Image (cartoon, helix red, strand yellow):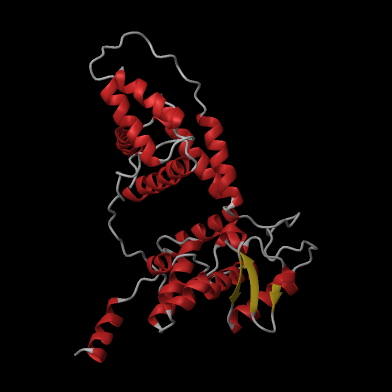
Amino acid sequence: MKQKIMKEIMQQMLPYLDNAQLQKLQEILGHSLYNYEIFGKVAEIEDDSQKLIDAFVYAKRIEGCSEKTLKYYRTTIEALTEAIDKGVCHMQTDDLRAYLTNYQKKHGSSRVTIDNIRRILSSFFSWLEDEDYILKSPVRRIHKVKTVTNIKETYTDEELEKMRDNCIELRDLAIIDMLTSTGMRVGEMVLLNKADIDFNERECVVFGKGDKERVVYFDARTKIHLKNYIDSRTDEDPALFVTLRYPYTRITIGGIESRLRKMGKDLEIEKVHPHKFRRTLATMAIDKGMPIEQLQQLLGHKRIDTTLQYAMVKQSNVKQAHRKFIG
């Protein structure tokens, strides 16, 4: 009971005292209440967790986070408040550790997923600390979750040619070429319009995560197949890629994923999905000597660590580099 009262007092004094003063107050309270027994019930303080979550999301929106990211933040934090019967200002490190452990057991989540949740909670509670809603973030003592780095697969040259050779529709051939030569995200590609394509320079501007603009480039083969596809269309939709059937509306991410998945199944190619083209381009660029900083800009990554995760350097090239520079 004593500890609860001390915590309530400290919580309410946060906006008015600095860290040194708060520490002194804690010492004085502990010393003053040491010889006293306290009975009774502490009045419940109104839980303002939802208001704080809303304020955090507003702050992140101002910082430029996308609506998709904001939604992920909100659902992750609200899931925590539903699982723990405490206001966010009263949650402790042990509460969060137990939550992450139970979440992993219940959902069978990977370490990567659990660390993503930890990072979001860390961002939220650090914000609460910076805004003087809490004294110290309870996530501080929860360290990064160790994950196993798996070398993810890329397409071979043979698989890419096999997909191209078996495209019946001009649109599908153009989609494969665009994904292969630009390395753009599928979400970026579905937003493109025909007017966005500069055929002379073989480039286009895409809007990446956080609505950041960047220029991507495509090769001569993509230019030819893309022009053939656009010239074959009879619709008036401005979208670069549209559905194959009337009313010929802008194709969705799900539509592309479904089409590629079926193609992979028909050709017996494992794990055919849009993101694998992006990873393939990154690996190919690194293998051919593209500086990592330039690849980072091409892929639209904020942090170079993210680029390094995409780029799987082939072991054969490591062997050749060893012979060239060392052996």
Residue at point 54% right, 63% down? Answer: 185
Q: Nearer the viewer, residue 299 or 121?
A: 121
Q: Position of residue 280 (x, y in %)?
A: 44, 71
How many numbered marks does the figure carry? 0
Judge whether residue 136 can be spotted in this image. Answer: no
Q: Nearer the viewer, residue 256 or 107?
A: 107
Q: Is residue 193 above or below residue 105?
A: below
> In the picture provided, is 73 more to the left or to the right than 189?
left
> Residue 194's x, y, as percent?
72, 69
- Residue 294: % across, % down: 48, 78
Q: Position of residue 80 (x, y in %)?
A: 42, 33
Tell me which residue sits at (33%, 30%) in the image: 26
The residue positioned 34% from the left and 21% from the top of the image is 4
Q: Quadrant of residue 232?
A: bottom right
Of the pair 308 and 230, the residue shown nearer to us: 308
Q: Is 202 located above or below residue 137 in the figure? A: below
**Image check: 59 left or right of 28?**
right
Placement of the N terminus among the 4 image quadrants: top left
Q: Name the residue rendered at 69%, 60% in the picture.
A: 242
Whether residue 72 is visible, yes or no, is yes
Location of the C terminus (image quadrant): bottom left
Q: Is residue 28 above or below residue 298?
A: above
Farthest residue, direction top: 40
